[in-house]
Image (cartoon, helix red, strand yellow):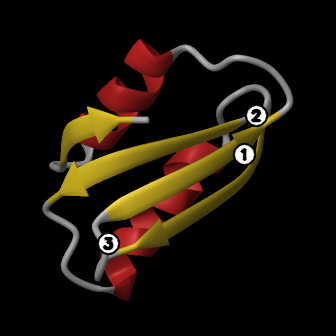
């Protein structure tokens, strides 16, 4: 499954790496791609994810999840 999040507050590769590292530890997450230029985070997973958990982890880093697709 693929989930795409629009994330406000990513400004550099460091921001991308912080998000990737945190989300990589979430159960069922296979791959995370973050792009500060498009402000998108793409998550590939083996099963449906708990989007509240994902949003909480991103927001705990100081970013804002604006949209989920």
Label 1 or label 3, whichever comes before in sequence order: 3
Judge depth for marks 3 and 2 and give the one in front: 2
Determine which residue is flagged by label 1: 44
Q: Is residue 58 left or right of residue 3?
A: left
Determine which residue is flagged by label 3: 15
What residue lies at 44% left-to-right and 35% top-to-bottom? 69
What residue lies at 58% left-to-right and 65% top-to-bottom? 33
Percent position (x, y) of residue 51? 46, 19
Residue placed most toward the observer, 65 or 58: 65
CA gap, disc 1 and disc 3: 19 Å
Q: Is residue 3 left or right of residue 46?
A: left
Label 3 or label 2, whichever comes before in sequence order: 2
What residue lies at 25% left-to-right and 52% top-to-bottom? 7
Q: Which mark is residue 25?
A: none
Label 1 or label 2, whichever comes before in sequence order: 2
Percent position (x, y) of residue 46? 86, 30
Residue 43, placed above or below residue 41: above
Percent position (x, y) of residue 28? 79, 28
How many other residues sit within 10 Å of disc 2, few (<14), some (14-19) or many (≥20)?
A: few
Label 1 close to label 2 by CB (< 8 Å)? yes
Q: Is residue 5 left or right of residue 9?
A: right
- Residue reaching furthest to the right: 46
Kindly state the secondary structure of the residue where label 2 is placed: loop
- Residue reaching furthest to the front: 69
Judge depth for marks 1 and 3 and give the one in front: 1
Percent position (x, y) of residue 41? 45, 56
Kindly state the secondary structure of the residue where label 3 is placed: helix
Q: Which mark is residue 1?
A: 2
């Amino acid at each position: 499954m693929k989930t795409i999040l629009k994330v406000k507050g990513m400004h550099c590769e460091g921001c991308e790496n912080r998000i990737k590292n945190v989300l990589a530890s979430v159960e069922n997450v296979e791959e995370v791609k973050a792009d500060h230029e498009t402000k998108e985070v793409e998550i590939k997973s083996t099963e449906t994810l708990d989007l509240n958990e994902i949003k909480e982890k991103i927001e705990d880093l100081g970013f804002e999840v604006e949209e989920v697709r």
